[in-house]
Amino acid sequence: MNLRTLAVLTLLASGCSAEIEVQTTPVDLSIPVTSIGLDGFAELAIPMPEEARGSITVISVEGEAFAVNTSDGTTLQFQLYVLPFGVRGTATAETPFLFTEANPPAYFPQALPLVAPTTFGPGSRTAQTITNPQLAAAVRQETMWLVAANTVSSVGLGDVLPLQLQLEGLTFKVIVTKSFEGSAGGMDVLGL
Amino acid sequence: MVSPPRRVLLLGLVGVLFASGPALASNGRLLTTDAAEVVDAPVLGLQRSAIALPAGFALDTSLLGDLVLVLNGGLRWGARLDVHRLVLGARYSQFVGTPVYSALLNTQESQLRRYEPALSGPSFYGVYGVELGSLLLQLEGKLELMSETTASLTAGAKFQLTPAWGLIVEGGVRGYPGRVETTPPPASAPFFRGAAGLRFGGETGQVTLGVAYVGIEDPMLGSFPFAPVLDLAWSFR
């Protein structure tokens, strides 16, 4: 009997709750801007780990990423949104969905701001922490959809469009308590 | 309408089945429910070990429960009247294995930060049964006041196929009164319960093997619709 089986059997044996910490797979994302004054958006689908599904209470959610501005002289303005629980995005885990403010999807007005507009200077690489109570509801589904926005107000010296803002190693740490209290059947098998 | 020759055959068959030897000694359990049987001799068993007291009372414990660090003790009273059997019992369980289990699980599930089994509390049960020759029919009602309240009503039947072999079938429903609705609801909280198995043995030693529907389905634990039921018991008469 391996340890996992033992662990499962002990959980089986009873009602119990467990506090579980899971981390989403790190992803990289580029948000391009193709013309001045026209915000570029990239929608990203983040599959939630199966351990954090089922009967759970979300204790905390925290996102981390590096925001990288590869331009030589342009300041990029970054903003991040999350689609609320129940609103399905277009992006898949494999393919981000890119759009501009000229052609946003119908559900975009429902997106909730996660990170207020933040500017990143040319050639910078900045650690960005993402915390927002809105995330607790959004992680309670199989996929969470984020929308990142990139705004360029003026192109700096030596830069040509399109300009990319890159999010590197975006990952979410989710802590949940999970209830296994329905497993009363295990008690009966033990004669309890 | 059953034709006369068939009726005779049916009656004969029922007669043969009911007359097929004495029932086995009681170890106090069917498969996953308490048996409508009086424990009138000391029993050393996995699911139930008991010391018989006068007037139908017995002090008991689930040895399997104790082994997985759910220390438990119960008081049981049983009575026979003609073919009727009545059993009433109460049990208190106290889980003492949190440090051991947490350590074990942490080596296995690195995402696990804290594990809090909630296995302590009282439970109460009552069983009424009718013994018709080799057939025991019974109904068990049970209330568990542990981390959450669980109530169940389970019908059971034990049929003595031969003097040594018995067939056991159980089926019932389980409810969770007072449960706060969660979204999504706990997957591993089935409404139905059931079990089937075989018992082999005699007046003293018995082996029971079966399968119980537990309906555990969880993205982390995996899917365990069924769990094995094992009981070894020895009666000291």
Image: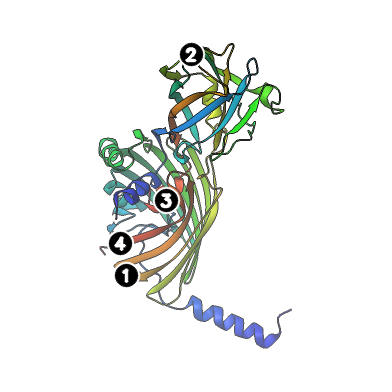
The residue at which mark 2 appears reads as A73
Q: Is residue B175 above or below residue A45?
A: below
Graded by Cα atoms within 10 Å as few (under 14), some (14 to 19) or many (20 or more), the crowding at tag 4 reads many
Q: Reading the chain from its start, which is encountered first: label 3 or label 2?
A: 2
- In this view, the residue in front, A74 or A41, is A74
Q: Reading the chain from its start, which is encountered first: label 4 or label 1?
A: 1
Q: Which numbered disc, 4 or 2, marks the residue closer to the eye?
A: 2
Q: Secondary structure under badge 4?
A: strand
Residue at mark 4 to residue at mark 1: CA–CA distance: 11 Å
Residue B53 visible: no
Task: Determine whether, in the image, residue A134 is placed left or right of residue B224.
Answer: right
Q: Residue at x 57, y 33 (%)?
A: B181
Q: Which numbered disc, 4 or 3, marks the residue closer to the eye?
A: 3
Q: Secondary structure under badge 3?
A: helix
Q: Which numbered disc, 2 or 1, marks the residue closer to the eye?
A: 2
Are both tags, 4 and 1, on one chain? yes
Are both tags, 4 and 2, on one chain? no
Q: Are the residues at dot 4 and dot 1 in contact (C-beta closer than 8 Å)?
A: no
Q: Which mark is residue B233?
A: 4
Q: Which mark is residue B203?
A: 1
Q: Quadrant of residue B106?
A: top left
> Residue B152 in the image: x percent, y percent?
52, 47
Q: Which numbered disc, 4 or 1, marks the residue closer to the eye?
A: 4
Q: Amino acid at mark 4?
A: Ala
Q: Quadrant of residue B75?
A: top left
Residue at mark 1 to residue at mark 3: CA–CA distance: 25 Å
